[in-house]
Image: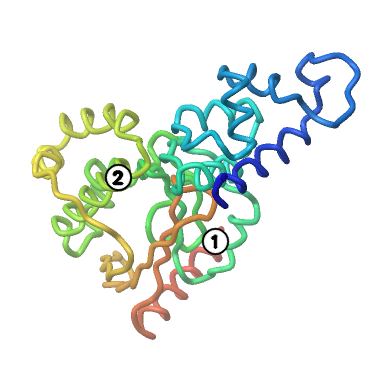
Amino acid sequence: MPSETDNALGTFLKNRRTRMDPATFGFAGRRRTPGLRREEVAQRANISPTWYTWLEQGRGGAPSADVLNRIAAGLMLTEPEREHLFILGLGRPPATRYQGPEDVTPRLQRVLDGMRFSPAIIKTATWDVVAWNAAAAALLTDYGTLPREQRNILRLMFTNSRVKAAQADWLGVARYVVGAFRADAARAGAQGDIAQLVDELSKLSPEFEALWRANDVAGHADGLKCLRHPEHGLIELEFSAFAVDGRPDLGMIVYNPASPETARRIEALMASRDRAS
């Protein structure tokens, strides 16, 4: 008898199959039931029609990740649907596929903009900054003035003298950044995507090369960051990192004032920036 999990997998596959329009894929002929036939899905997924039929009937056993990926492509599943397919078929989500930097949705940008006096950014697994709010532009880096390829946290940390001088403990921050960067890239399956950046920074910065060779790995959930501002003095920030649901390659970092005095300094900084604009 098929297990409850097998039945759930078969029900999900049948549901998605019957939603598909045969004409979209050039499959003609009169049909008594909606959607694609089983053999047509098998053809699109490049697997045996018998094997696919067994999967829908809950008697095919555990499919491989490769088979599930083929079926997901054949059924044109969305990324959440593909993840659900893997959970039903293998009891786990699929391996992360790094998508590379993209612009964030307007809704997510409004979340950043709603934090008036808390610098906040969205970064990729390779630590490219793809979104930020006004407070981040004022206190951290005005990313909008930089070419897209220069909006990388590691590149700024190791090659930008202003960013380097602003760190109260540059070496400690740099060590943490390199370790967290290594962990993020590996988790997202982006090791190949960072090879060029790592090679470039190793040539430009002996400090980076030494830290990278140390092979340290760090996590980043929350902590304290201290910045030196030329006009407003030492600014202490508490930072927290958050995942972006549906985009495992993106993360949000929010920096909140660590004290009322810091909050007043950030508010003064933002006010002077508004007057200048």
**Closer to the camera in the image, 259 or 46:** 46
Q: Residue drawn 50% across and 47% down?
A: 87
Q: Residue furthest bottom?
A: 260
Say which quadrant the C terminus sits in.
bottom right
Say which quadrant the N terminus sits in.
top right
The mark found on residue 112 in the picture is 1
Q: Is residue 31 left or right of residue 168?
A: right
Q: Is residue 137 visible?
A: no
Q: SS at mark 1?
A: helix
x and y percent of residue 100 in the render?
A: 46, 35
* CB contact under 8 Å: marks 1 and 2: no
x and y percent of residue 22 in the render?
A: 80, 22
Q: Is residue 128 left or right of residue 76?
A: left
Tell which circle, 1 or 2, labels the residue nearer the N-terminal end: 1
**Closer to the camera in the image, 168 or 93:** 93
Q: Is residue 114 left or right of residue 259?
A: right
Q: SS at mark 2?
A: helix
Q: Amino acid at mark 1?
A: Leu
Q: Residue drawn 64% across and 16% down?
A: 43
Q: Is residue 182 left or right of residue 245?
A: left
Q: Is residue 116 above or below residue 205?
A: below
